[in-house]
Image: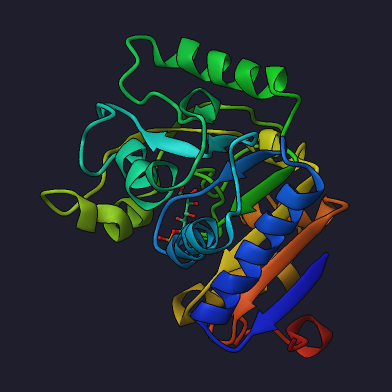
Amino acid sequence: MRTRVLPDYETMSAAAADVVASKLRKKPHAVFMVPTGTTPLGMYRELVARHEGDGLSFARATFFNLDEYLGLPPDHPASYHVYMRKNFYGRVDIEPERVHVPDGFAPDPEAECGRYEQEIRAAGGVDLCVLGIGRNGHIGFNEPGASFDSRTRVVRLAESTRRVNATDFEGDRAPERAISVGMRTISDSGEVLLLASGANKARAVAAAVGGEVSEEVPASALRRHPNVSFLLDRDAASALEGSAARRS
Ligand code: F6R
């Protein structure tokens, strides 16, 4: 596992975009798995800028999202479908048929989970999985306690996650449930890049990097992965000790 600490959010986002762009250069038809949320917005901005300015092309790549809220139609303003169209998919040259976001409005959510997992397999598996991290250590919507062997499934969100994510919704809570790819789905990726920014992620990052590998800290599972990097800004790295806090 590699840990890189960058001075601030902008340099962390540019470094994340470098990893994606370099994967694309080596393998234009690469398969990516990507997150939503606040953390990757800078990376998406940077990738859009490189598309517009330098001609970085996503035309042959395939994208899968990690998760979607259950019960939201794809045109709901708080859905991850809308987030991705607005911040990334709608602004670069990605082929619509190579974009995959779980359908949180599917009439049979369990069948949708099976279908999604099958689509990932049919695409040949994920080359690079980009992750954020929850304050409680979640990755995707795999909350503490999620089995390391889990696949795409319907999950119940932690109360703390529902409160943190409430800002996108009327009322004080995000929906109760979501579709999330599983811990095993993530671990099967060829390479994993986890991004974290801000002091409110410092404890989760320290637990994932330096604590026990435990299902209570989902991100700690990544320590068993042969090719994983944590890209952190200084605040997110502030609770790390010693060599794990190496600056770059
Ligand atoms: C969202 C996702 C989540 C977020 C995490 C951090 O697709 O998979 O695991 O990455 O909740 O969210 P932010 O970046 O908003 O702090």
Total label count? 0
Left or right: residue 136 compared with residue 210: left
**Which is more toward the observer, 158 or 195?**
195
Residue 32 found in image quarter: top right
Query: Residue shown at 56%/14% (left/top)?
Result: 114
**Which is more toward the observer, 102 or 143?**
102
Left or right: residue 95 compared with residue 176: right
Name the quadrant of the N terminus: bottom right
Left or right: residue 190 compared with residue 58: right
> Residue 127: x, y in percent?
75, 41
Name the quadrant of the C terminus: bottom right
Does 19 sit above or below residue 181? Answer: below
Left or right: residue 24 compared with residue 81: right
> Residue 244: x, y in percent?
78, 81
> Residue 148: x, y in percent?
70, 39
**Which is more toward the observer, 236 or 92?**
92
Residue lying at the far left in this picture: please name it: 170
Q: How is the model colour-coded?
A: rainbow
> Residue 125: x, y in percent?
74, 29
Residue lying at the far right in this picture: please name it: 226
Query: Residue shown at 65%/31% (left/top)?
Result: 150
Query: Residue shown at 56%/59% (left/top)?
Result: 137
**Which is more toward the observer, 199 or 121?**
121
